Amino acid sequence: MTRTLRFFAWASFIAQVTIIATGGAVRLTGSGLGCPTWPTCTAESLVPTDELTYHSLIEFGNRLMTGVVGIIALIVFLLVWRIRRERRDLFVLSFLVGIGIVAQAIVGGITVWTGLNPFIVGFHYVSSLALVCISAAFLARMDSPAGPRESAVPGWYAGLTHVTSAVLFISIVFGVLTTGSGPHSGDTEAGRTGFDSVFLEHVHAWPGYALLALTLVLVIAAWRLRLPTLRWSIALLAIELVQVGVGLYQARNGLPALAVGVHMVLAALTAAAMTIVIMRLKRPVTSGVAAGEDAAAEASAR
């Protein structure tokens, strides 16, 4: 891969995580309707006007970030276009990111039109996480040769990894429902889900602890068996430990906005690390074939 593609691929991933942070800032500062309409900020103006408050600047800044994310994704797509035949995997991933950004912008507009419906806002966040995961998958495949792949781990380990990813998804869903029931609605006039937020906090914690335990098993197994997932499973475990700490802090201190925002970003990094662990479950077939040929050559030489 060229140095230029590598740079913009990382920039795309960082931008996808950053827009989750800026989107969180919009919600946590009560700026969700700072621009009361979409795609313009007001019915008469594309940008915030003097009559609007700082909430408008925060919301409009997040909209501008969408443009930044889109431009970087377009650059990555154009760079991959030249190698689309030999690297169809990278082409498909870059295309999905581009389409996803467009879809996300539309969903963002719908959230404004519906007065920050908590379920649509939650879907908006989960979709952002999906784009982070696709960007992470691009990074993982970028340094791997093209072609068919084969399993690099025992079958039970691959199955346990997928179970762990499913538990992560459940934890994220309940986290979204918890936030949608809590005090950070994005605007004083925005609706809530109507669920008991305190009860959901406990329900959200259960898969979180299960995720931590399962990841620890993955790390120990990868270390004992010397699997290619070891480094990223350790990274996943480290992020989860920080995430649990932040979750306990925010729950015991009245959900301070900054802690909730950090929790949101850490969820994105957790999903990204989980994605790369899954990508490491397989390796290019060519490497295995080459190893077999080398072994055969050594045997014949004897």
Image (cartoon, helix red, strand yellow):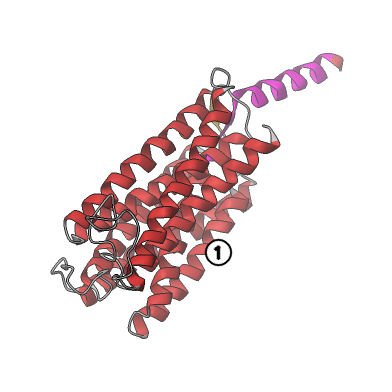
| 214 over 133 or under it: above or below | below
Q: Residue at x 61, y 44 (%)?
A: 227
Can you see residue 278? no
Majority secondary structure in the magenta region: helix
The part of the image, by quadrant, that contains residue 148 is: top right
Looking at the image, how many numbered discs can be counted on the residues? Answer: 1
Q: Position of residue 55 (x, y in %)?
A: 33, 70
Where is mark 1, residue-wise? 238
The magenta segment is 279-300
Q: Nearer the viewer, residue 45 or 262?
A: 45
| 215 over 78 or under it: above or below | below
Judge whether residue 19 is colored magenta: no
| 281 over 260 or under it: above or below | above
Q: Position of residue 126 (x, y in %)?
A: 33, 52
Q: Residue at x 25, y 76 (%)?
A: 183
Give the residue at the far left of this rendering: 194
Q: Residue at x 62, y 32 (%)?
A: 144
| 226 over 254 or under it: above or below | above
